[in-house]
Amino acid sequence: MYPHYSYPPKLITAILRDMFAARPRHFQDDARACIQNLRPPLQVLGGEYIPQAGPYVITVNHYYRAGFGAQWFALAISAVLPIDIHWLMTGELTYPGKWYAPFGKLLWRLILQRGAHLYGFTTMPPMPPRPRDVSARALSVRAVLNYVKRARCPVVGLAPEGGDQPNGQLTMPAPGLGRFVLLLAAQGLRVAPVGAYETNGIFCLNFGQPYELKVCCDKSAREKDRLAAQMLMSHIAPLLPSSLRGEFA
């Protein structure tokens, strides 16, 4: 038994209209409209830790099961927070091993790029990293850092794992993610961990206590990256049911 996820029909029409007209929309308003449609209602735990103002980087597990769309954890978090979030989203769906992969990738690349433009988000090449995406990934990182420097109280949202994981269990992010969040931390952003999961037919968000991401200065760049990523996931793990904690159980 799972929650019933659906979008208000009028909202879908409005989004498609503004997407093709290249008119910006407010993601938080659309997120709240979608979450109000969720049955049973969203359950929020750790409400005392919900950030009320930036600067923050929101880190959430990339919860996955067949039939669940990753957009729902972004919608839920944006609906709950009283502040706007600049989400880092994938720029492509890959469909590994599927005969329709070339067409699917092209179609969704266009949809995702238009969606990011609609809400002012930043896209990132898909995970796992591909050698040909190095320059595009660097451009995305610079775009987020520029947003952080430009915004008065920036709030960045991301799922460190960057993609669907087997059985929805936590895994270590790809190399470079820890280094990226360290760059955000160096700009004064604290980390706010969130656990997203379904239990007893209810979709849940569990907010954890925010913290400062720091690693020892005497480590190599690779070791700093690994330690930072491990710290990010270790703070998310206790916010999840034990069955979803994976290697961080």
Image (tube, grey):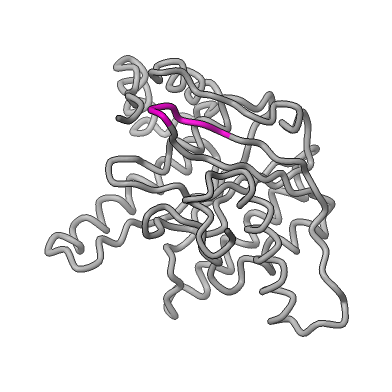
User: Does residue 173 lie above or below 195 as drawn?
Assistant: below
Residue that extends furthest to the left in the rendered view of this protein:
99
Instruction: Give the tally of numbered discs.
Output: 0
Q: Closer to the camera, 236 or 126?
A: 236
Q: Position of residue 203 (x, y in %)?
A: 45, 30
Q: Is residue 203 magenta?
A: yes
Residue that extends furthest to the right in the rendered view of this protein:
217
Q: Position of residue 38 (x, y in %)?
A: 40, 20
* Stretch in magenta: 200-205
User: Does residue 127 lie above or below 65 as drawn?
Assistant: below
Q: Would residue 218 appear left or right of 90 to someone viewing this image? A: right
Residue at 71 percent of width and 71 percent of height = 227
Q: Quarter-wise, where is residue 21 in the image?
A: top left
- Quadrant of the image for the N terminus? top left
Residue at 32 percent of width and 24 percent of height = 4
User: Does residue 178 lie above or below 206 as drawn?
Assistant: below
Q: Name the main secondary structure of what is drawn in magenta.
A: strand
Q: Would residue 216 appear left or right of 5 to someone viewing this image? A: right
Q: Closer to the camera, 220 or 200?
A: 200
Residue at 74 percent of width and 81 percent of height = 221
Q: Closer to the camera, 60 or 131?
A: 60
- Quadrant of the image for the C terminus? bottom right
Q: Is residue 212 magenta?
A: no
Q: Would residue 228 appear left or right of 23 to someone viewing this image? A: right
Q: Position of residue 174 (x, y in %)?
A: 53, 70
Q: Quarter-wise, where is residue 17 in the image?
A: top left
Q: Position of residue 63 (x, y in %)?
A: 45, 47
Residue at 38 percent of width and 18 percent of height = 39
